Amino acid sequence: MSNRLAVLAQYLIPKQALTAWAGQIARARGGKMTTRLIQWFVRRYGVNMSEAANPDLASYPTFNDFFTRALKDGARPLERAELICPVDGAISQFGAIECDQIFQAKGHHYSSTALVGGDAALAARFQDGSFATLYLSPKDYHRIHMPCDGRLSRMIHVPGELFSVNPATARGVPGLFARNERVVCVFESAHGPWLLVLVGATIVGSMATVWHGVVNPPRGGQLREWRYDEAPVLLRQGQEMGRFLLGSTVVMLFPKGPLQFNPAWSPGAAVRLGQAMASRPAFT
């Protein structure tokens, strides 16, 4: 019952205003106040600072600098796999796309067309393909890396709601990942197209990519799109591609074809950047 009430409350709270306020605090250079906030956050969520390239909490000028902290060299070795896990987090769901339907939680699906902001032609490239949805909790490392080599062709900022994306909300809000604000990154590879979608949430101050910088704010009501045909962006497996400034979820789509996910994977299981995620016979 408590989870149901928490989900219902999200329909009532001013999520956009709350997120804008949180973003201001996260960007503020508050000196000792910022340090106290970071110290509280580390205690509250059990953040492992021994993995951080800079473990000195007092040295971070803003909360965002702390939240998007780099890891020590070698903290996340990359396993030999065609597709590696792009983040630290937990598995929400993964598996086959049934026609254009992506499984969110028991009783809930959403369409690939809705996820990408209404572009049916783009969504059709992933019909009967595969997907993986990974949740980043507050304690996790919040930079996002490439699961495989890719050439960026498009980026689409889709405005939307800012519901929480925790497991309870995923079970309770229909079409959650296609309703929340998101940044859709379209990549091409030698083995076909694939998508990496950064999904926003309550308190997520902004999302950023390495080629663009901060994508949001601004938060308008219109879909925005960038194309990179004239200035290609090439990224290698394991390379950073973006980051959340206050955590959320990534959704990946892959085209039709045999894709075998790591047999150790199961919904709810913890995953780490660099672990083997999937293999495809065509990749070898």
Image (tube, grey):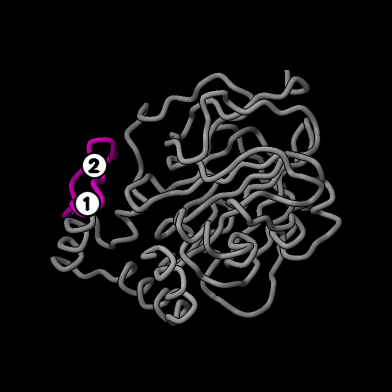
Q: Is residue 34 left or right of residue 23?
A: left
Spot occupied by residue 180 in the image (x, y as percentages of width and height): 58, 66
> Which mark's residue is nearer the viewer, 2 or 1?
1
Q: Toward the viewer: 100 or 194?
A: 100
Name the residue: 44% across, 49% down.
Answer: 136
Residue 111: within the magenta?
Answer: no
**Label annotation for residue 193:** none
Decide: marks 2, 1 in contact (CB < 8 A)?
A: yes
- x, y percent for residue 57: 19, 51
Name the residue located 71 percent from the left edge and 24 percent from the top edge: 280
Which residue is denoted by mark 2 in the rendering?
49
The residue range painted magenta reads 42-58
How would you rate the neighbour count of disc 1 (Cα within 10 Å): few for under 14, some for 14-19, many for 20 or more?
some
Tag count:
2
Q: Amino acid at mark 1?
A: Val
Task: Say above or below: 241 vs 166.
Answer: above
Q: Which residue has dot 1 on it?
A: 42
Q: Is residue 83 left or right of residue 5?
A: right
The spot of residue 18 in percent (x, y) is 39, 77
108, 178: nearer the viewer: 108
Residue 102 lies, with reference to residue 268, above or below; the image says below
Residue beneath the point at 52% across and 50% down: 242
Residue 279 location, x and y as percent? 66, 24
First of labels 2, 1 by sequence position:
1
Residue type highlighted by circle 2: Met
